[in-house]
Amino acid sequence: MKTMRRTALWHVIALMTAGLVLQGCGTTTAPKAQTTHHHQTPPAAATPQYFKGALPALDAVQFLSQNQGFVAGQGIVLSTSDGGQHWTRIYQGTGTITDLAFPGATQGYALTSGGQVLAWQGGTQWEPVSGLPGSVSGLWLSGTSIAELLTSQGTLYRPGPTAGSWQAESPRGVTAASFDGATGWAVTQATGAAPQVYLTQNGGTSWSLSYSPKVSGPSGWTAGLSSSAGTAWLLLTSSAGQVEHQPYVAYVTHDLGQEWQEILGAPLFADQGMYPQAPSSLYGLQAGPLFAGAQHAYFVSWKPGNPSDVLAITASSDGGQSWQQLPVQGVAHAATPYFFHPIGIAAVPGGTIWLVGSRSGSGTMLVSHDGGSTWQVVAP
């Protein structure tokens, strides 16, 4: 009996020992604790905070494609990724943004009315660009970086050999410039001299005189430039006109300046003045900002005397051989930008043109999807 009990005891001890060994080896399954299963809902994607409300005065517009674009003005930069249906505020400040240079959707530069350059990196925050050579009045890109700066004293600068340094270029007395990669154009006007056009093909390392426009009167001209590849467009406007007349002349080159053509002009008065060959339908127009590509060119124009046709687009689709004056139609006169305030113009392939500006201190945006024939107001 004792033997049987002893044997049974040893069996129990053996079983207990084996259980402990197996448990230590992790081969036994511990009793499952009772748990309550909660079905967790994934966090919802953040809803974009679209800009709503009245626009401040606007000065600049840039579109990278039909959908991606930017507008800027008094203390604000707005971005759209759906062709202007929705806008997101990406900058808010106290100064006025007068120009934009965006190589992509999340990187760009903004120029303030005080001559400061702000950089937007990674789509997160704006930082002032340090080490500038002075108050800046224009900027241009090469790739994703600033390629050229124009100071308010008329000197062009390009990045120097070390980070944050800038190197002055010739010519001096620059009043307007335009760059497309390493190819750039600059207009100079010394005191008492007629405007001169210079060309660089190496990013500003060296410049050569390309053209001397044949204009009457050596001073009082304001230049606008727009370039694409080997094509450059030049618009000169004169301050010699009266209230409702402003002489202007436009030129184009399609072969890197080997030949320039005078393609459009408006005299001081009909049938007399500086450019008697100007089309009669364009008499009396005043010329505004210019935006052009290889074959298409647009500039804002103003025809006084008819309230519904005050603001117009003068357009060419054949490299400047023919032009149309297209009054801004389809919107109320009170909704159009005021001509004598800063106006920004941009266009993308396919006939879409954007106009931004201000009227009575408030900003306004207009878009045309048919090359300027009809327009509509864009309200955030």
Image: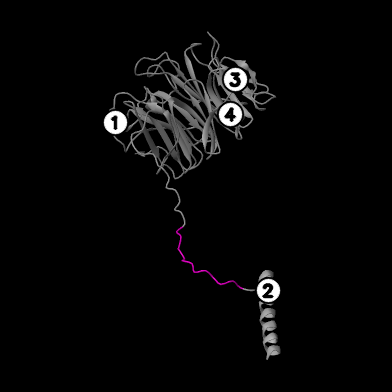
The residue located at (33%, 34%) in the rendering is: 54
Q: Label 2 crowding class (10 Å Cα cut-off): few <14, some 14-19, many 20+?
A: few
Q: Indicate which label's residue lies in the foreground, 3 or 4.
A: 3
Q: What residue is pinned by disc 1? A: 334
Q: Which mark is residue 179?
A: 4
Q: CA distance from mark 4 to mark 1?
A: 35 Å
Left or right: residue 234 compared with residue 202: left
Q: Which residues are magenta?
A: 29-41
Secondary structure of residue under mark 2: helix
- The tag earlier along the polypeptide, 4 or 1, is 4
Q: CA distance from mark 2 to mark 3?
A: 82 Å
What amino acid type is highlighted by mark number 3?
A: Leu
- The tag earlier along the polypeptide, 1 or 3, is 3
Q: CA distance from mark 1 to mark 3?
A: 39 Å
Asked whether disc 2 touches disc 1, contact meaning CB atoms under 8 Å apart, the reply is no
- The tag earlier along the polypeptide, 3 or 4, is 3
Q: What residue is pinned by disc 2? A: 22
- The tag earlier along the polypeptide, 2 or 1, is 2
What amino acid type is highlighted by mark number 2?
A: Leu
- The tag earlier along the polypeptide, 2 or 3, is 2
Q: In the image shown, does 215 or 6 lie closer to the viewer? A: 6
Q: Label 1 crowding class (10 Å Cα cut-off): few <14, some 14-19, many 20+?
A: few
Q: CA distance from mark 3 to mark 4?
A: 12 Å
Q: What residue is pinned by disc 3? A: 156
